């Protein structure tokens, strides 16, 4: 049975300041898979996320969320997605549960204490940490709270922007396991990153961006992972001509 496509970029072009920063980019992400958008600084990764979120208009082509053109219905697109930025902004003076309650209220989602604790269990945030103010959290712990928020919103689609930047190796492995579990549960996940190894560890498919163009794509074999060396060679060759 074919998976349902949740995100699509179709010949996407974006101009900023008179310069073309995305040039005819096309890819899709289905429910149940992780798509890694890989590239160096300035490749166009964050611009791609911004067009899906409706923060930047497409200059040509289009981006589609759940069969709807983002340009014609931004509000519907945003309701269907949860976005995790590189540095999730939460309130330092609130603890994990208080932050979750507050941000869920902002989007009109009601969740009980048992549901919030279940989400925090799912992201493996230690019970004793849940009553600590976020000013005492590591970046890995903050990322767990942000992912718990995405889980509680129960959207079909997750957008992740450099989600493992600054995390230690153990936290990165835990994060990848969590992302993989969410995809296996049917979520469509678009993860932008410059981390070749991390992308190969978790992604079903990888698209390589350079200079605003999608220059290569890679797919994991059945039951396996994308070969890191193959992607690394392509990344190095493409980013260091």
Image: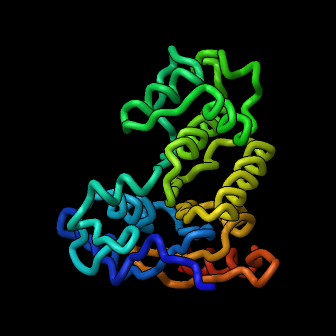
Give above or below for 208 relative to 165: below
Examine the image and state in which quarter residue 59 appears. bottom left
Give above or below for 85 relative to 38: above
> At 38% from the left edge and 68% from the top edge, which residue is drawn?
65
Would residue 101 be found to the left or right of residue 56 on screen?
Answer: right
Would residue 144 be found to the left or right of residue 212 on screen?
Answer: right
> At 25% from the left edge and 70% from the top edge, which residue is drawn?
58
Q: Nearer the viewer, residue 92 or 162?
A: 92
Q: Locate residue 147, reporting x and y percent.
A: 59, 43
Q: Locate residue 176, reporting x and y percent.
A: 72, 55
> At 39% from the left edge and 76% from the top edge, which residue is drawn?
9
Would residue 30 be found to the left or right of residue 26 on screen?
Answer: right
Q: Locate residue 172, reporting x and y percent.
A: 73, 48
Q: Locate residue 98, reporting x and y percent.
A: 53, 21
Give above or below for 77 relative to 39: above
- Badge count: 0
Which quadrant is the N terminus positioned in? bottom right
Q: Nearer the viewer, residue 184 or 143?
A: 184
Residue closest to the far left: 18
Residue 140 visible here: no
Q: Nearer the viewer, residue 111 or 236?
A: 111
Residue 168 visible here: yes
């Amino acid at each position: 049975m074919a998976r349902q496509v949740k995100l699509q970029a179709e010949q996407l072009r974006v101009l900023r300041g008179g310069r073309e920063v995305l040039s005819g980019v096309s890819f899709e992400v289905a429910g149940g898979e992780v798509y890694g958008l890989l590239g160096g600084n300035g490749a166009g990764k964050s611009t791609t996320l911004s067009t899906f979120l409706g923060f930047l208009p497409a200059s040509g082509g289009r981006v589609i969320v759940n069969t709807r053109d983002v340009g014609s219905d931004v509000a519907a697109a945003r309701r269907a997605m949860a976005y995790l930025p590189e540095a999730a902004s939460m309130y330092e003076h609130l603890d994990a549960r208080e932050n979750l309650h507050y941000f869920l209220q902002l989007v009109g989602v009601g969740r009980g204490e048992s549901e919030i604790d279940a989400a925090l269990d799912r992201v493996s945030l230690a019970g004793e940490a849940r009553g600590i103010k976020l000013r005492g959290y590591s970046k890995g712990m903050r990322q767990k709270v942000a992912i718990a928020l995405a889980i509680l919103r129960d959207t079909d689609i997750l957008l992740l922007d450099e989600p493992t930047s600054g995390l230690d190796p153990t936290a990165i492995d835990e994060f990848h396991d969590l992302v993989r579990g969410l995809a296996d549960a049917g979520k469509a996940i678009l993860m932008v990153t410059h981390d070749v190894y991390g992308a190969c560890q978790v992604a079903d498919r990888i698209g390589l961006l350079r200079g605003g163009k999608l220059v290569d794509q890679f797919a994991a074999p059945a039951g396996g992972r994308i070969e890191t060396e193959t992607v690394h060679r392509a990344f190095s060759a493409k980013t260091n001509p």
